[in-house]
């Protein structure tokens, strides 16, 4: 799946792919990834500017769990 050019909500270019899995503090996370936790959902993308997370159809929600990036 190709990375979106911009966030559908705020138009930021700071888009990260959501990485799912059981992550520990020692789990390496790439610079272009956002830790999504162990519960896999249809959400694929995270905006580092406004925290909107969305699926390939553009539907999503704001991430309120992680206040820091």
Image (tube, helix red, strand yellow):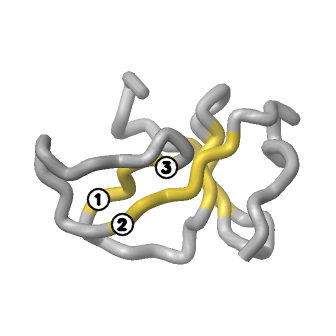
SS for callout 1: strand
Q: Earlier in the sequence, mark 2 or mark 3?
A: 2
Name the mark nearer the viewer: 1 or 3: 3
Find residue 42 and report its horizontal and vertical position in percent. Answer: 55, 76
Secondary element at image label 2: strand
In the image, 62 versus 36, the foreground residue is 36
- Residue shown at the point (19%, 57%) measured from the top left: 23
On screen, residue 61 above or below 20: above
Characterize the local packing of mark 2: few (<14), some (14-19) or many (20 or more) Cα atoms within 10 angstroms: some
Q: Which residue is mark 3?
A: 33
Q: Nearer the viewer, residue 60 or 44?
A: 44
Task: Tell me, for residue 52, which label it has, or none.
Answer: none
Report the residue marked by disc 1: 37
Q: How many marks?
A: 3
Residues at marks 2 and 3 touching, judged by CB atoms closer than 8 Å: no
Please give the name of the residue rendered at 38% of the width and 75% of the height, measured from the top-left corner: 40
Say whether residue 8 is left or right of residue 43.
Answer: right
Separation of residues labelled 2 and 1 (CA atoms): 5 Å
Looking at the rendered image, the quarter that the C terminus falls into is: top left
Residue labelled with disc 2: 20
Whether residues under marks 2 and 1 lie with C-beta atoms below 8 angstroms apart, the answer is yes
- x and y percentages locating residue 46 in the rendered image: 59, 48
Q: To which quarter of the image does residue 32 belong?
A: top right
Give the crowd class for mark 3: few <14, some 14-19, many >=20 residues within 10 Å.
Answer: some
| Secondary structure of residue under mark 3 | strand
Quadrant assignment for the N terminus: bottom right
């Amino acid at each position: 799946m190709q990375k979106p050019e911009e966030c559908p909500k705020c138009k930021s270019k700071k888009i990260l792919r959501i990485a799912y899995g059981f992550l520990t503090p020692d789990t390496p996370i790439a610079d272009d990834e956002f830790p999504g936790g162990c519960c896999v959902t249809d959400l694929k993308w995270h905006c580092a500017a406004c925290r909107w997370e969305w699926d390939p159809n553009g539907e999503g929600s704001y991430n309120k769990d992680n206040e820091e990036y």
